[in-house]
Amino acid sequence: MPEDSGDKTLRQRMMTLLKAEECGVRDISQALHISEKEVADHLTHIRRSLAAGPQSLEIRPAECLACGFVFKDRRRFSRPGRCPRCRQTRISMPRYYIC
Ligand SMILES: [Zn+2]
């Protein structure tokens, strides 16, 4: 994927948001006026680029609002559709932060 300067600036703004508070994909997409798909792509890059340094992209996993099941193993940047334990679809968005 080619990187232009606009892309880098966007990613820096995203990192600033993530350092300030926990953000869901939708929060970031609304704050930066980009699609949720683009947010997911940038998050992947941010996680990779932070891996070498002292900080990292942390994930507060999605959680079933009905039974409290936590989607701990989920690494994709999207919301699970359905709880494997109780089959409910009321699931909180995973949230991301840098620390
Ligand atoms: Zn559940």
Image (cartoon, helix red, strand yellow):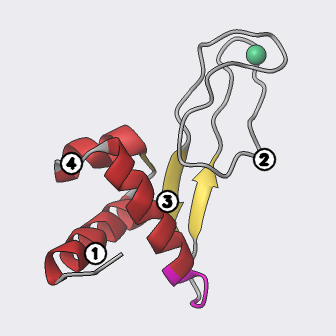
Q: Which mark is residue 97?
A: 3
Q: Which of marks 3 and 4 is nearer the N terminus?
A: 4
Q: Earlier in the sequence, mark 4 or mark 1?
A: 1
Q: What residue type is labelled 4?
A: Ala
- Image quadrant in which the C terminus is located: bottom right
Bounds of the magenta span? Answer: 49-53
Disc sitting over residue 12 in the figure:
1
The residue beneath circle 4 is 31
Q: How far apart are marks 1 and 2 (CA)?
A: 27 Å
| Residue 99 showing in the rendered view | no
SS class of the residue under badge 2? Answer: loop
Point out the image quarter for the N terminus. Answer: bottom left
User: Cα distance, mark 4 to mark 1?
Assistant: 13 Å
Kindly report which numbered mark, 2 or 4, lies closer to the viewer in this rendering: 2
Query: Looking at the picture, does residue 24 appear above or below residue 57?
Result: above
Left or right placement of residue 97 versus residue 2 in this view? right
Determine which residue is flagged by label 2.
Answer: 73
C-alpha gap between disc 2 and disc 4: 27 Å
Which quadrant of the view contains residue 79?
top right
Mark 3 or 1, nearer chain start = 1
How much space separates mark 3 and mark 2, taking CA atoms?
17 Å
Left or right of 27 in this view: 69? right
Whether the residues at callouts 3 and 1 have beta carbons within 8 Å, the answer is: no
